[in-house]
Structure formats: C-alpha cells, structure tokens
Amino acid sequence: MSNPIALVTGASRGLGRALAAGLVREGYTLIVDARDEAALIAAADEDGFALAVPGDVTDPGHRAELRQAVEKLGGLDLLVNNAGTLGAHPLPAMADYPVDELRTAFEVNVVAPVALTQLLLPALRVRGGAVLNVTSDAAVEPYAGWGGYGAAKAALEQASSVLAAEELTVRVWWVDPGDLRTDMHQQAFPGEDISDRPLPAAVVPGFVRLVTERLPSGRYRAPELIS
C-alpha cells in the first residue's frame, strides 16, 4: 500500500477517534483498536478506518493481533499510544488511593503502551517511523486527586524520553493534549459542567503538524503546535 500506515489505540471515541480521523484526512491508512467493539466498528465505518481490531491493549494476545494487522498491511509508519484509564474515581487522595486501582492505572497507562511499542519497533525502524504517546499535564503538575493517573503518565513520559535517546531512526513524541471535553475528563469531575473545554477535534491540527513535519523527538503540548 502506498499510503503511510498508522495504528491508534483507544480510537472508538474522544481524542483517539478524532486523531485517527484526522490522520485519515492526511492520507494515512488506519489500524484502530478499543475495548468497546460496537463503538469501534461504528467509528471505523463512519471515519474510514481500514482495520478495526477490538480488544484490550493490556492483553498480550490482543497486542499480538495488532502486530498481525500491521503485517497484513505491510508495515507501520506511526504508532499512537492513546488508550488509557483515569484510574480510581472520584479522584482520591494519595493517602487513600486503592493499591489495586493504582496497579491497574500503571498497567494500562505505562506497561501496555511500552509492551506494544516493543512489539512494533522492528516494523517502525524499517520505515523510519514514529511513536506518539499521549500524556497529560498531570504528569508534571501536582494536582490534588490526580496522583495515580499523574504518576502513571509521569512514568510513561520517562519511558518515552529514554526511548527517544536510544532510537536513532524512530521519532518518539509524548504529547499533552490539554484539557478536553471527553468522557474521561467528565469522570474526573462528576456532575460538573465541562462544556467550556474544547472538543478533541480542536487539538488534532497540532498532532497532525507534529506528525507531518516530523518534528524532533520530545515533549509537546498540542495547543502550542497549532498555528
């Protein structure tokens, strides 16, 4: 296939879906995944995603299926690790954070994207591709209640930074999209009106610029990439 190929996790809704749709408009062929099979298939049909692979990215078997999808299309130019979890909510203080919930937050937000990246790096190296990890300002700011999510995203950022130092041909970006009007953000503020936050589509141009201009590896804020 002549079009560049991207894999976006967590693409059934929110930022993942908006970003995947934006990449399709830029000429990418998309492989997408999400846990909600019905929502993923509907998004794929509506937005023109080439392959929809339902499943949980924390499952090694599912990650193997994603690699098979990459092989089916003949390679990979971009891996977007977007799938994530808020963790325990309503947001608890660190003194009360359930350890099992904390473990799950790290499994979804750190271990799974690192494991998927390891699996797909050989394909990305062949094509001089890129890894884009979605992070958060909670990784670098001490927001009360955000300890579990923030600690996991901070670990993802450090893993991204080290990977960027190690990889010579693959770009590695970790990108804070800013506060957005998503289901996850609503979970963090139950009962509150978050309509003042922008929709995910508003920051997609920032991500697209990063990818199409192939900016240097590093940490970025999507709103600041928008001209």
Image (cartoon, rainbow, N blue to C red):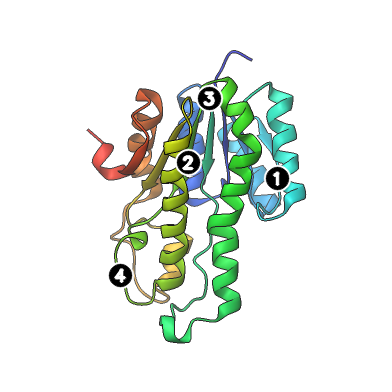
SS state under label 1: helix
**Left or right: 106 in relation to 209:** right
Q: Is residue 55 above or below residue 208?
A: below
Image coordinates of residue 61 in percent, x first then y, are 77, 48
Other-residue count near label 1 (Cα within 10 Å), few / some / many at <14 / 14–19 / ≥20: many
Image coordinates of residue 72 in percent, x first then y, are 74, 26
Q: Is residue 53 above or below residue 59?
A: above
Residue at (30%, 70%) from the top-left corner? Answer: 142
Q: Is residue 26 above or below residue 191?
A: above
* Mark pair 4, 1: CA separation: 32 Å
The picture quadrant where one finds residue 119 is: top right
Which label sits in the foreground, 1 or 3? 1
Q: What label does residue 63 carry, if any?
A: 1
In terms of depth relative to the viewer, which is nearer, 41 or 160? 160
Residue at (32%, 58%) from the top-left corner? Answer: 137
Work out whether mark 2 precedes mark 4 in sequence or the reverse, and give the earlier one: 4
* Mark pair 2, 4: CA separation: 25 Å
Work out whether mark 1 precedes mark 2 in sequence or the reverse, and give the earlier one: 1
Tag count: 4
Other-residue count near label 2 (Cα within 10 Å), few / some / many at <14 / 14–19 / ≥20: some
In terms of depth relative to the viewer, which is nearer, 48 or 130? 130
Q: Which residue is mark 2?
A: 163
Image coordinates of residue 135 in percent, x first then y, are 41, 52
* Mark pair 1, 3: CA separation: 21 Å
* Mark pair 4, 3: CA separation: 37 Å
Q: Which residue is mark 4?
A: 142
| Amino acid type for the residue under numbered disc 1 | Arg
In terms of depth relative to the viewer, which is nearer, 4 or 214? 214
The picture quadrant where one finds residue 103 is: bottom right
SS state under label 4: loop
